[in-house]
Image (cartoon, helix red, strand yellow):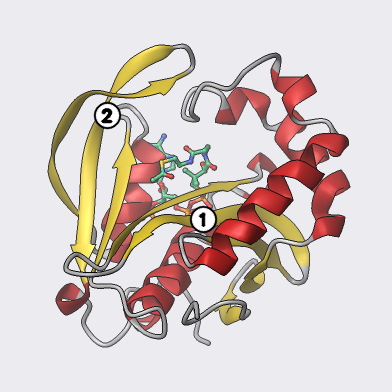
Amino acid sequence: KHPGWPSTLGPVRLHAGLLTLRPVRMRDGNTWSRLRISNQNELLPWEPTGVGQWERRHQASAWAPLHSVLKSEARRGVMLPYVIELDGRYVGQLTVGNIQRGAVLSAWIGYWVDREHTGRGIAQAAVALGVDHCFGPVGLHRLDATVQPDNVASQAVLKAIGFREEGLLKRYMDVNSRWRDHLLFAMTSDEVVGSAVDGLVRSGRALGR
Ligand code: ACO
């Protein structure tokens, strides 16, 4: 029913190791909790406002209900929730959401990487795998990414893959307790030359497959 789910994507070879995307699992709870709590300062400025304290929202017991929502949305064909693995270790997440079929064939893409592993091309490789999968087996035509103007690292990731800036969405999302402006970046399938992963390899940002 849901083309392209559930499958593992990659690998992409980086200096840092072998990067893959694999579906979230029920047993990710402890790692998810540990990483989300240790990355609070890095994540809080960019993520949708949640109900209650960060630590409480990210205790290991919060994973089971979240995981079951992600899994059922994935089965419905609305989401693709992945864990980013480097040499088999959980180093972040990449999520494709609001998959719309019919005449738009579009979705959004979002991601985060553990601060112990940033600056090594991990997000770029993960987004490239996600883009190739969405425009390939999933059959989408357009991907959107919304990012705050001061999130320069995330904008660098999107530009490296070939996302274009399309405009400014005023007071778009409730993030860190305020309605924050976001830049809309987007890419359509016809804009990919060969594949996004090949593009990273050509530009020296990844070593190969
Ligand atoms: N100023 C300018 N460029 C920067 C800065 C900075 N302060 N910090 C990093 N960069 C650049 C790097 O140079 C690199 O670009 P380059 O290859 O052209 O040199 C790029 O940003 C980072 O690329 P990666 O190494 O692939 O990214 P990384 O694995 O470090 O992950 C990420 C980046 C995802 C933004 C990570 O820092 C993170 O998780 N941040 C917190 C959560 C977040 O902001 N998520 C994105 C929200 S927006 C969205 O999801 C669409």
Query: Toward which corner of the image does residue 62 lie, by quadrant?
Result: top right
Residue at 62% from the left image edge and 73% from the top image edge? 20
Residue at 30% from the left image edge and 73% from the top image edge? 140
Between marks 1 and 2 in the image, the one whose residue lies nearer the viewer: 1
Q: CA distance from mark 1 to mark 2?
A: 21 Å
Report the residue marked by disc 1: 95
User: Looking at the image, which is closer to me, 96 or 20?
Assistant: 96
Query: Toward which corner of the image does residue 105 lie, by quadrant?
Result: bottom left
Q: Position of residue 73 (x, y in %)?
A: 56, 57
Kind of element beneath mark 2: loop
Q: Report the residue that reaches farthest toward the left.
A: 167
Identify the amino acid type marked 1: Thr
In the image, is 180 to the left or to the right of 73? left
User: Looking at the image, which is closer to me, 161 or 54?
Assistant: 54
User: Looking at the image, which is closer to me, 48 or 191?
Assistant: 48
Q: Position of residue 122 (x, y in %)?
A: 55, 60
Identify the amino acid type marked 2: Pro
Residue at 46% from the left image edge and 60% from the top image edge? 78
Q: Is mark 1 within 8 Å of ligand 1?
A: no
Q: Position of residue 9 (x, y in %)?
A: 57, 79
Residue at 77% from the left image edge and 70% from the top image edge? 88
Kind of element beneath mark 1: strand
Residue 183, placed above or below residue 31:
above
Report the residue marked by disc 2: 149
Q: Position of residue 97 (x, y in %)?
A: 44, 54
Q: Is mark 2 within 8 Å of ligand 1?
A: no
In the image, is 79 to the left or to the right of 151? right
Label at residue 185:
none
In the image, is 156 to the left or to the right of 88? left
